[in-house]
Amino acid sequence: MPRTLRLYAVLPLRWCLPLLLLLSPVGRLRGQDAAAPLLEQARKYEAQQNFIGAEEQYKQALEIAPDNPEILKRLGILYQTEEKLQDSVEAFQKILASQPQYPQTNFFLGVSYFALNNNDGAISAFDKELATPHPHPKCRYYLALALEAAGRTGEAITQLDKLVAENPKQADALYELARVHKNASLRAIQMLHDIDPDSFQLHALMGEVYGDDERYSEAVKEYRAALAKRPNAPGIHQALAIAYWAENHLDEAESEFLIARKEDSGNAMTNLYLGDIRVKQGRFDEALDYLQKAEAGLPRLEQVHLLLGKCYHGLNRPDKAKDALLKAVAEDPSDSLPHYLLAQLYREAGDADSSNREMAIFEKLSSSANAKKAAESQRSF
């Protein structure tokens, strides 16, 4: 059975290519004037989905102009609509035998081959179409589908990446790109499972998968299983610490971050997390050391300056706290929390005007319910 085509969406073949001939340029070729009434009637029949009637009109037109490539192409596209795929192939091949780059014919030939599960033929036809001066706009997309179907996943991804680079809003290409990567990931996971369902690699990978999905308890379980296999595996303690931190298990997170810091003392993110934990625990002297190291590696990260502002406030260094919070505002003007903290800082300093100004900005930025909820959870020093 022929493969179902996907042109813009997953639809049966009959609806994938209806009236695509209307996209084709019409030249005034030999015999076409005499055949014009027949072509016009064929279009009307197609609009009515009277495909048998349309086919008869095209065949009569070909009796008048047997070698007219445009009529042959229209008939070939109609054959696709009728799922007479082999007939469509023969029509397109007849055109290409004399005019190898006839507009969009290689594309439609590739579509027919693709529907017939002839991936090699489809890939060849799509490659030839891309070599023409004005290839069909869907050619690269279909080439990617054919390459994936042929098991040439890397090449399929390359074609989809080119489509997205040309048009970042190309939804079909983005969908296929995400699907191809997902399928490749699932295949790799299954292969790892088949090799050894209790392997270090599988536990580490599943920990990452669960972490990305915010299923942190399951991530912790997988990372611990990975460490049981390889206690000194680099990077796993950091990943485990982040999962603990996300669940607000700060003691466990701190322990794992300290191990991760021994592996890489200059890691700015490790120092940032440790600084965050120390600030939450009120251990501001220790937090400052970690946060200054984080700032050296991540000078443009708003969260670094936000935490430094909290830390300096806890150390009763209001000028330093204000400078840090102003840097946080500069790095992310849309975040309401630094403005709230600045308002609190100015109020403590007796500067009512500045406090009111910052509070007005905070209220404006946190107008949505979700933003207010997020700010409420962190708003006090």
Image (cartoon, rainbow, N blue to C red):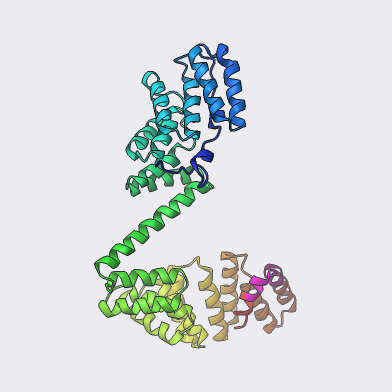
Return the residue found at the far front: 52
User: Does 365 appear in magenta?
Assistant: yes
Q: Is residue 160 above or below residue 75?
A: below
Q: Is residue 231 visible?
A: no
Q: Is residue 10 above or below residue 53?
A: below
> What's drawn in magenta, residue-wise?
362-373
| Closest to the observer, 117 or 257 | 117
Q: Is residue 336 visible?
A: yes
Q: Name the quadrant containing residue 98.
A: top left
| Closest to the observer, 273 or 358 | 273
Residue shown at the point (42%, 26%) measured from the top left:
92
Quadrant including the C terminus: bottom right
Q: In the image, residue 57 lies at what x, y percent?
A: 55, 21
| Closest to the observer, 219 or 142 | 142
| Closest to the observer, 143 or 66 | 66
User: Does 18 appear in magenta?
Assistant: no
Q: Is residue 356 left or right of residue 67?
A: right
Q: In the image, residue 273 lies at what x, y percent?
A: 45, 77
Q: In the image, residue 133 lies at what x, y percent?
A: 45, 27
Number of residue marks: 0
Q: In the image, residue 338 lies at what x, y percent?
A: 61, 73
Quadrant including the N terminus: top left
Residue shown at the point (58%, 16%) measured from the top left:
36
Main SS of residues in magenta: helix
Q: Is residue 18 left or right of residue 177?
A: right
Residue shown at the point (37%, 79%) measured from the top left:
221
Q: Is residue 6 left or right of residue 90?
A: right
Q: Is residue 152 above or below residue 328?
A: above
Q: Name the quadrant containing residue 251.
A: bottom left
